[in-house]
Image (cartoon, rainbow, N blue to C red):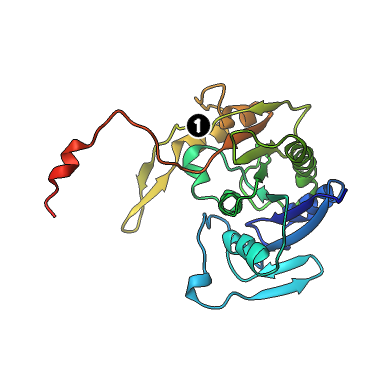
Amino acid sequence: MRDPSILVTNDDGIDAHGIRALTDALESVGDVTVVAPADNQSWAGRDMTWHAGPTGIEETDRGYAVEGTPSDAVAVAVSVLDVDPDIVVSGVNDGMNLSAHILERSGTVGAAIEAVHFGLPAIAVSTADHTSPEPPHPDPDAFETPAEVAAFVTERVLADGLGEAEYLNVNVPAFPDDPEIHRTRPTREYAVEHDPTDEDGVALRDPGWQQFLTGESIDAPETDRHAVLNGNVSVTPMRLPRAVETDADFSGFDHHPA
């Protein structure tokens, strides 16, 4: 029986500490191929650049560096380099990816979603030191435990599958003290506040993130932010957006003005 084929990518760039730690941890699980952005693509979401011109690809001692976004990297791996992975693992991201509104903006999660569109199971893995959550984190040790958790979760997914889920969003405290793994859902708590500035315009901020940093989060116990705030690992089963059944008949649409 062959070893599982694992495609590793990220949004912090191919030279980031997190992807190095993840690659090292996953080498005990299967045959790892790294295809990642050449530079930092944080907050890229599912943006792609190949429609704007040629995409550069360079083979390095760490893997393949792609001049593009995390989604570009996954597309290049599958469509250009003919990587045929059993699973795609994205991370370890330097900074948490918690709550529904953040997932849509994350390049780490975006790479996992891109993999799902190719029919592949995927895992997005992120971390932060809650006492100093803002990246970058220069300490490579901060990624050791998250990478080990990622390897464990990857083994379980390869063995057991994802059930009704299509990918997992995993968030791990950087230096956890005997953490538990909690199955969670993304928090839906969201608001935007603003402050005046000395210049024209306003400074926008997310009060939920500020509450998370101070340990005053009001998120429900079953949510991702609540789990991480309490020092535990959050594993959130996810699916892509789908059309849904609804009781609304939309009959009024029959009278459109077109």
Residue 189 in percent (x, y) is at 44, 32
SS category of the residue bearing label 1: loop
Q: Quadrant of residue 162?
A: top right
Quarter of the image with the C terminus is bottom left
Residue 237 position, x and y percent, is: 60, 35
The one of 195 and 209 positioned closer to us in this rendering: 209
Q: Is residue 239 left or right of residue 161?
A: left
Percent position (x, y) of residue 110?
56, 52
When the figure is inspected, residue 144 is found, relative to residue 231, above or below; the finding is below
Query: Which residue lies most toward the bottom here?
Result: 54
Is 166 positioned to the left or the right of 203 in the image?
right
Residue shown at 42% from the left, 36% from the top: 190
Q: Residue at x 49, y 47 (%)?
A: 104
Please name the amino acid that badge 1 sits on: Thr
Which residue is identified by label 1?
Answer: 187
Residue 7 locus on image (x, y percent): 72, 55
